[in-house]
Image (cartoon, helix red, strand yellow):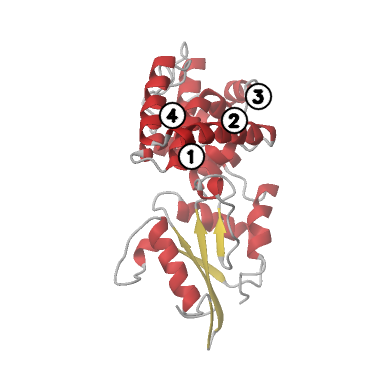
Amino acid sequence: MGKATNWVIVEGRIHDRAFYSRLLESISPNGYARSVVMLAETLTVEGQCAGGKPHMLKLYDSFKTSDTLLQENVAGQSAVIFFLDRDLDDYLTPLVPREHLIFTQNMDVESEIFAHAKLDRALCATHGLDQVEVSDFFASIPQPTSNLFKIWRMWIKLRLISLHCEIPNGRRFSQPSKINSNTYGEVCNERYQAIHDELQKCAQSTEFEDVKSRVESDLENIIALQREYTLVPGKWIPGYLRHLIEERFRSDIVRKNVSDLEITTACLQSIEFSDSWTSYYETQLQSILVRS
């Protein structure tokens, strides 16, 4: 790693590099060194290359332990910066600030994209619709992430119970709801109860009741603070947006079978990186980025 450069290391292959490249370009004024965004899987630690958060954290620990997060060379300083998905890491325990490591404000990069996208602009492009009609539609409904939280609240509740109790196969709860009729309809009580009882068998009975109470309290607090976005993974959102469009414009000629990737990419392209939401990142980066 040579020259005066900000080396930015990210997790995901698909959207992370594009998102963080545009973010850094927008908040790095003249005078700062160039930023190069790299995939974690291209770097080796302990003889291994891999993607994902565990490898990212191993890389971070390696740079931290060797005191090379900030480096000096003949061309000047170079900084190594890590961007990580928040996921549910701060649900059970608060995240401890670590130098040169920045977590997403929302749950992951994809949810960050949907939080700041111009949805009407993106979805009229993906589905071949008139932007005015799409804009009017989204102006008339609740914010999609918050509304999806409301629809899938019981599914999210089961997910958090599973997380608390460290129950095996908890990864299934990262998938779309299996307890709502037609995915986005009413909760099917029989499906909910079946999974509830399954979780209860896997956990200690006294612990399970305590965890249920805590999770319910946590959900109420999250709603009161309007932080529903912290519990909705980005990969859940394209399907819900597609559902909203197809339901609202079912009598219109709408492009069908639009993929999650197309929706997410269009939303990423619609983001205004000059908007105030970038201050969350800018504040943290000001003390890290090196100058040219």
Q: Nearer the viewer, residue 202 or 141?
A: 202
Q: Are marks 3 and 2 in contact (CB under 8 Å)?
A: no
Q: Mark 1 highlights which residue?
A: 234
In three-dimensional space, the C-alpha distance between marks 3 and 2, rounded to whole angstroms, equals 14 Å
Residue 125 in view in this figure: no
Q: Are marks 4 and 3 in contact (CB under 8 Å)?
A: no
Residue 53: percent from left, percent from top: 42, 56
In three-dimensional space, the C-alpha distance between marks 1 and 3, rounded to whole angstroms, equals 21 Å
Q: Are marks 2 and 1 in contact (CB under 8 Å)?
A: no
Residue drawn at (32%, 72%), measured in percent from left and top? 46
Query: Which of the two marks, 4 or 3, is nearer to us in this view?
Result: 4
Residue 84: percent from left, percent from top: 50, 56
Which callout, 2 or 1, points at the residue further toward the start of the chain?
A: 2
Q: Nearer the viewer, residue 118 or 154?
A: 154
Residue 231: percent from left, percent from top: 54, 38
Q: From this view, report whether residue 155 is shown above or below residue 86.
A: above
Please state, as top left, top right, bottom left or bottom right, where the C terminus lies in the image.
Answer: bottom right
Mark carried by residue 239: 4
In three-dimensional space, the C-alpha distance between marks 4 and 3, rounded to whole angstroms, equals 19 Å
Q: Mark 2 highlights which residue?
A: 146
